[in-house]
Structure formats: C-alpha cells, structure tokens
Image (spheres, rainbow, N blue to C red):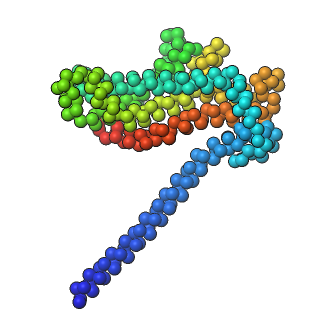
Amino acid sequence: MSNMTKVNAAHTKHLKDGMIKSKSTRAGDWIIAIVCFALMLVCLLPIVHVLACSLSSADALVRNDVFLWPKGWNIEAYKTVLTTEKYVRSLWWTAVLTVGCTLLSLALTICCAYPLTYPELKGSKIINFLILFTMYFSAGTIPSFVLLNNLKLLNTPWALVLPNCISVFNVIIMRSFFFGVPDSLREAAEIDGAGPIRTLVQIYLPLSLPVIATLALFYAVGRWNGFSDALMYLKKSSSEKYWPIQLLLYNVIKNSTQTSEQAAQEGFFNNGVSKTIQMATVMFATVPILLVYPWLQRYFVSGVTIGAVKG
C-alpha cells in the first residue's frame, strides 16, 4: 500500500505540474497573439486610413474629419486616376517593368548561382570572393550615375533595368539552395548523358520552386516600390513616359502646392481634391503588390530557410 500511495502521489504531482505548465503555455500564447494583433493593427491602420481618405469628399479632408471611415463618399479620385493618361500609362509601365525585371533577375541569379555548385569549376573561390566583395563594398551613387551617363543609358528604361538586375544576397540564397540538392541526383543525370543545362532544367529548377518564388517576391517588391533610381536617372521631361508609379506619386505629392492654373490643368481644384487623388494613387501603388503575397506566401518561409541550410 505504501508503494501504491507513493505512485499515486507522484502521479498527482505530475498532473499538477502539467496543469501549471499548460496554464503558463496558454498565457504565453495569449501574449504572443496580442502582440501579433497589435503589430497587425500598426500595419493595417495606415492602409485603412489612406483608403478612407481616397473615398472621402474634398471638404471632409480639408476639415480633417476622416480617420478610418470615409466621410462624404466620393470615387471621383479613382475616376481621375483611371481616366488620366499619365496615371494609366505609369501603372501599366510599372507592371511591365516589374514583370520583366523579375524574370531577368531570376534568370541571371540562376545562371550565376548554378555554376558555383560544381566543385570542379576553376577559380570558384575567387569568383565567390568577388561576388561577396560587391555586397559589402560598392562604388556608390555618383560613380553609378557617371557610368550610366557614359554608357548613354540615362533617361532610358534601361537605367531602371540593368543597375539592379541581380542581387548578391539572392545569389547566395539560390546557391545555398542548390547546394542542398543531393549530389546523387546530378550524378545519376550525368550517367544518363545529361549535360549541365539539362540537369539544371530537369532536376534543379523543379526542386527549387520554393526559393524561386521567394526570390521572385523579393525582386518584384523591390522593383515595384523603387523610385530613387528613377528619380536620379530619369531627369529629362522626355523620359516622363518611363516614370514608374512610385515616382509619379512622388511628383504628385511634391507638386501639390502648384499654382491654381497648373492645378486646373492637372485636375487638382483645391487641396482636398489634390489629397484625394494622392491617396487614390497610393492605393493603386500599394494594392497590386499586396495581392501577390497570398499566392507566394506558402513558398516564402521554406524558400528562405532551406536556402540558408548549407553554403
């Protein structure tokens, strides 16, 4: 009986300890959930405020009555954006530029990372060093501007494509992912007579969909949100047709204090109307790239973590 009593006492103590740990675990989960919810609100509320302003009347914006819900519902700002040639052209050009730059960047990243997985590649250590060196040390903005000027690329769309068409960080992620592919698969393909290109297309790329989707997201978001390169490299008025939507939005906000005659020509009749158009342009510049995330979210974490295992 004494042994049974000891066993029961130990079992009871174990249950109590488990209940205490379970309560502490639930408390920790609640704290994490509250923190995540607060961070979600911090990210979401500005977008909701911009959306409310874009759907509000000009008078409500002038009176600063709009916070999270539109006042005096009005979609004239969206009609202006969708019917004004420069806005529509800038949106389409930004979409084409983002897709083209993403595809080009992915192709160059794969072509750079794949050869580095071959141990018999001569000079691979030197190549890796030079690639890493460019990630830590760069010439800077002024030499880049001078280089593009000497190459006659300023005020052309190539000024937005070539300088940032490849990222060393993304090359390292892709290379590390390729290192994670078993060597036995490549050896089996070589035994069957497959060359390097066929091995890449039939073995490496199908296995690399998570990291490709992740890097595509990196490149697409970077190009869609980029405007500093366009601001520096597209200075002439003749290059206005190559303005991405972010640069157009920058100039809309910058020129919101223009004269009344210029404002009438651009569709800005008062400060309230100007602000509604600004907010509508912000929504057009933000929503498309946000819609990409749900399609690539399931690849995002696995692509980054798997690519960081080796290399």
Q: Quadrant of residue 72?
A: top right
Q: Quadrant of residue 107?
A: top left
Figure quadrant of the N terminus: bottom left
| Residue 69 in view, yes or no | yes
Q: Tell me: 258 left or right of 220.
A: right
- Whole-percent x, y for residue 44 in the image: 60, 46
Viewer-side residue, 250 vs 44: 44
161 over 305 or under it: above or below: above
- Whole-percent x, y for residue 27 in the image: 48, 65
Figure quadrant of the C terminus: top left
- Whole-percent x, y for residue 253 in the image: 70, 30
Measuring 56% from the left and 49% from the top, which residue is drawn there? 40
User: How many marks are shown on the rendered structure?
Assistant: 0
- Whole-percent x, y for residue 84 in the image: 71, 24
144 over 53 or under it: above or below: above
Viewer-side residue, 146 vs 193: 193
